[in-house]
Amino acid sequence: MKAAVVTDFHKPLELQDLPVPEPGPGEVLVRMESSGLCHTDIHAAHGDWPVKPVPPFVPGHEGIGIVEKLGDGVTERTLGDRVAIAWLGYACGKCRYCIGGWETLCLEQRNSGYSVNGSFAEYAVVPAAFATPVPDGVSSRDAAPLTCAGVTTYKAIKVAHVQPTETVAIFGVGGLGHLALQYARIVGGITVGVDIEEKKLDMATVLGADHVVNAAKTDPVAAIQALGGADVAVVLAANPQVFDQAFQSLRRGGRLVCVALPADDAALSLPIFDTVLNGKTVIGSIVGTRNDLADVFALHAAGRTEVVAVDRKLDDVNESIADVLAGDIPARIVFEF
């Protein structure tokens, strides 16, 4: 099978011909139809984060495909099922986090395309219980970005407890941000899209953003405070400075939701008096659960969200990474197999 492989953090991905993997007990073999390119895949390929994956490995955690083979003991899925391979590739199901509805915090979790091989290949294996079914009303092309960009931002809006008419500022309107705007609107938020790329702000406007701010031309803090301040600021841009801007944009009682992960593990510095006296809250939000992903698919099948993506082939993986890093892609890239 063809696969894009990270062999060295300082080299481009290699297209290799690898054996088709065999599903073990409790696992399924999935023939990939599409896979999104997430910025996390780029961080993985470059070894940017403190806990690094071990080369060689296959990135990818927005994979959609068809179950072609069942491992021993599999009862949750059947041959021909269309399923998603998400970042959460496994959780123990027994710890306090798993049984408490926070399986994404499980200390025994495995992550697709990071600690185990992912979806940048024609075939991948995944535990059957973590192969989330994709409903008929969602195309494989749309389902791919929804599997990470969608479920991550859906969860961020969910944990922020956005109320109708609250102002929600989305810092970074790209692959994640264009979906975050839509989820904030679904729950009744008044949305502000913040970015430094005019074409991304144009996309935000088309998707229904109530306000947009070009942070390359205008101080986003002043612009948002002129609107009355943000009740919720969601940071999806992996620039440490943006976290500070987002916090400063909050009104009293506001919530800062941290989602993006800067490459250098930067620290977040908060003014204590401002935080305490103005009742502000800082929330860390990691990807959503399997239930959250099912919700994301259901919303899309109901016509509530739109996925903006550019189609590519896996052969173009290195060019695609360069385009994302250059800011040339409005939202998501999806590799079609």
Image (tube, grey):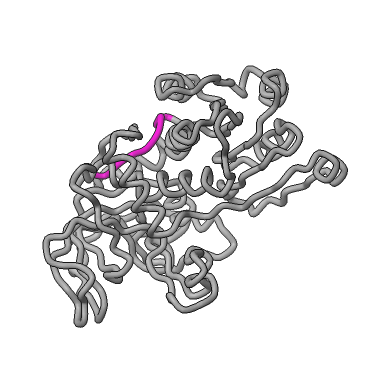
Q: Is residue 84 left or right of residue 103?
A: left
Q: Is residue 234 left or right of residue 332?
A: right
Q: Residue at x 55, y 20 (%)?
A: 212
Q: Please tell me whether residue 329 belongs to the stretch shown in magenta.
A: yes
Q: Residue at x 18, y 68 (%)?
A: 20
Q: Quadrant of residue 55?
A: bottom left
Q: Quadrant of residue 15?
A: bottom left
Q: Position of residue 239 (x, y in %)?
A: 62, 40
The residue stretch that appears in magenta = 328-335
- Front residue of this view, candidates 280 and 246: 280
- Front residue of this view, candidates 128 and 326: 128
**Outermost front residue:** 164
Quadrant in the picture for the N terminus = bottom left
Residue 325 visible in the current orientation:
no
Q: Residue at x 41, y 24 (%)?
A: 207
Q: Position of residue 263 (x, y in %)?
A: 58, 50
Q: Is residue 221 left or right of residue 33?
A: right
Q: Is residue 158 left or right of residue 122?
A: right
Q: Position of residue 297 (x, y in %)?
A: 31, 47
Compared with 267, 320 (above or below) is above
Compared with 292, 203 (above or below) is above
Q: Please tell me whether residue 184 belongs to the stretch shown in magenta.
A: no
Q: Position of residue 256 (x, y in %)?
A: 66, 42
| Labels in figure, total | 0
